[in-house]
Image (cartoon, grey):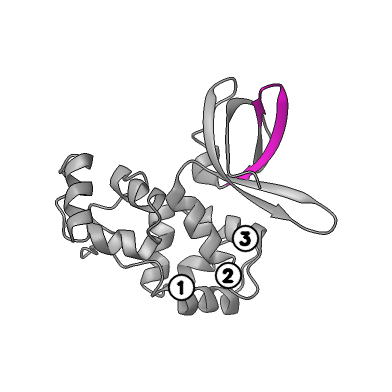
Amino acid sequence: MIARLSGIIVEKTDKSVIIDVGGVGYEVFVASVDYENLYLNEPAILNTYHHVRDVSEELFGFSSLVGKRLFELLTTVQGVGPKAAMAILSVADFEAVRNAIAQNDANFIAQAAGVGKKTAERVALDLHDKVGAGNINNTGFIVGNVARDDALEALIALGYSLADATTKLKDLPADLPTPEKLRQALAR
């Protein structure tokens, strides 16, 4: 299983990038939020999900562990394969998608290419308890837990689920330095 790639982006296609790792080019499908932040001839690190089928193998890559964990959760929903999960994650940044799922917002999820209303409702129903609601303000967006939250990434790397990591960071001040956030989260 290929879990992580570190190399140079040598090509960008419609929904994927080719990352050169020691002279070997790997095609990796990425969500639009990551696609926009990957640049040709620049180094990149992608956390990958290696999808193996009878007739092919595909890599799906994420700049953050949060994105990868959310992708893995999405693929557990009946009727949501890797391509549909990637389409859902391409609607907005990972945190906005997670927030929509936590709030049972099937209309937001249904914006994904190829994802119908019934599938979107199933995603919201099956996963809203698993993604954690975070600290939701009056605009509906999560405060203090952004997609690139290093403390959230660290907790996931330590083996916490996305929901558990979110719960541990809930109500901690957003301006706390990452080491202090981690210390307080782990003490809970």
- Foreground of the two, 109 or 154: 154
From what the image shows, is residue 36 above or below residue 152?
above
Q: How would you rate the neighbour count of disc 1 (Cα within 10 Å): few for under 14, some for 14-19, many for 20 or more?
A: some
Residue 159 counted in the magenta span: no
- Foreground of the two, 31 or 56: 56
> Is 179 situated left or right of 141 in this image?
left
Q: Which residues are magenta?
A: 19-30
Residue at 41% over, 71% down: 130
Element assignment for label 1: helix
> Is 89 situated left or right of 159 in this image?
right
Residue at 28% over, 59% down: 142
The tag on residue 113 is 3
Q: How many marks?
A: 3
What amino acid is at disc 3?
A: Ala
- Foreground of the two, 48 or 174: 48
Disc nearer the start of the sequence (1/3): 3
Disc nearer the start of the sequence (3/2): 2
> Is 139 situated left or right of 101 in this image?
left
What's the distance in space between the residues labelled 2 and 1, CA to CA? Answer: 9 Å
From what the image shows, is residue 113 above or below residue 19?
below
Q: Which residue is mark 1?
A: 127
Q: Is residue 111 visible?
A: no
Quadrant into which the C terminus falls: bottom left
Q: Which residue is mark 2?
A: 76
- Mark 1 or mark 3: which is in front? 1
Pinpoint residue 117: horizontal percent, then vertical percent.
Answer: 57, 76
Residue at 55% over, 39% down: 35
Q: Decide whether the magenta segment is chiefly helix, strand or loop.
A: strand
- Mark 3 or mark 2: which is in front? 2
Element assignment for label 2: loop
From what the image shows, is residue 128 above or below residue 43?
below
